[in-house]
Image: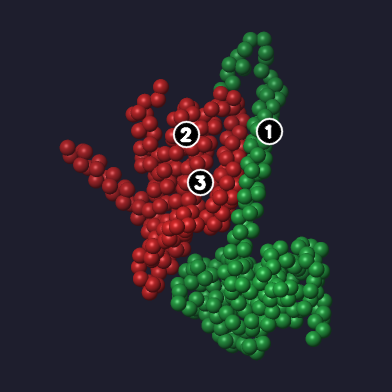
Amino acid sequence: MITRAELREIFANGVWKQNSSLVQTLGLCPLLAVTTTLINGAMLSLATLLVTGLSGFTVSCLRKFIPYEIRMPIFIMIAATLVTIVDQCMASWLSEIHNLLGIFIPLIITNCIVFARIEAFAAKNGPIQSFFDGVSMGTGMLWTLVVLGGMRELLGNGTLFSGIESIVPSLSGLRVFSDGYPGITLFVLPPGAFILLACMIATKNAFLARRKAAEASR
Amino acid sequence: MTADAANTPGTPDTPVRVAFRSAATLAVFTAVSTLFLATSYTLTRPVMEASVRAKKMRAIEEILPPGIFDNDISADILSLDSELSPALIAPTTFYRGRKNGAPAVLVVETSARGGYGGPIGLLIGVRADGVVTGVRVTEHRETPGLGDYIDLKKDKNRKNPWIRRFDALSFDARPESEWKVKKDGGSFDFIAGATLSPRAVVRAVRDTLKFVAEHRDALYGAPEKDGAAAPHPQPQGDPS
């Protein structure tokens, strides 16, 4: 049976302890390329979340039928099928976002976090746990990319949530700084993403170190 | 994972047997995946095509004054597969707007060569009298925050965006030598440090307008065609 503690552990792992961007630093290429705005980062993460969740579930359901020697090609085929379906659905119903994210939706297949979770988790655990593990990993990526995309958008363009009108037409993005804000181009370009990601990792490490020190002195 | 099968007494697990079993398993998985993909493709294709069409119509309507045409502009298409000038990348598609059957406006969909990040997709509206109704960059990979001001959505100058420099211009309104960015001795301004993007756009718009001016009647008159079989207007086809 699946216990609540088990699910909590899986969730904590995905969102914080084994965060795909901050701890495992996997999938950095799309991270650098699409986090120019908060919405872009969020949408790529949600697409990845769908793929990690569904591929975990599928692989886990089929794991008894997958011979060990050829598990890799089968994993790739399952994940690639799901990525393609997600890609086609986005092109149909979220076409503007799909245009913005472009090649990075099909490229989810190359995000190591998808295979890392299939191989390390879904191949050994039940379908519900595996689905939840994929969703948790995606959630970890989601909040990281939302924070990173938000910072880059704010510093680079002075806006937040721009592009939300292509998802919910009645909403529009926020102009946080006045129209005269020149924007810091560095943060729009990939080096800015590296710098901000490094700051986030450093903050996380500092927080963990401080907590460890507090525990040790207790 | 197939340990049970392998240990079944009486069936020696030869390498050939393992290979065949693997191949069969892989074939089954491939077939099932293909089935899923085919289903998904069949279901999403009509929606996808409709959203591409709707997006194109929105972009066309954005650069045309309301009521300038009364035909189905998205269906009255002429597509040319040859390069119209060195500044333009084929194909170039002309959406022909007519009012009461008379030529009213052309929306030209083309790509500019020479952008910093590759081709720059353009949509150019030209009234029958040669006046530009508007120009939009539809696709580009120019440097964010630097060369991307050619894209109206990215231009930080919201009051007087760069791409509106073409509004209400016509090819005859300026001598051909002035259809350049200021750096090249022309009359179009640009942002220092990002000359390549506006230079490519100015050249592409210039050549498009020139082509439209020279082949106006042929463009409006040619039978409706979409694709490779489209007749190319004669280079000297304009009798005027």
The hue of chain B in the figure is green
Q: Which residue is mark 1?
A: B31
**CB under 8 Å between discs 2 and 3:** no
- Relative to residue A54, is residue B231 depicted above or below? below
Residue A150 place in picture, x, y as percent: 39, 57
Q: Secondary structure at mark 2?
A: helix
Identify the chain of the residue marked 2, using the numbered disc in the image.
A
Residue appearing at x 35%, y 52% in the figure: A200
Please tell me whether mark 3 sits on a helix, a strand or a loop.
helix
Of mark 2 and mark 3, the one earlier in the sequence is 3
Q: Mark 2 is on which residue type?
A: Phe
Amino acid residing under circle 1: Ala
Q: Which mark is residue A47?
A: 3
Q: Are marks 1 and 3 on the same chain?
A: no
The kind of residue tagged 3 is Ala
Task: Chain A: give its colour.
Answer: red
Few, some or many residues within 10 Å of mark 3 (<14, 14–19, 20+): many
- Picture residue at 60% right of the left edge, 40% below the top: A81
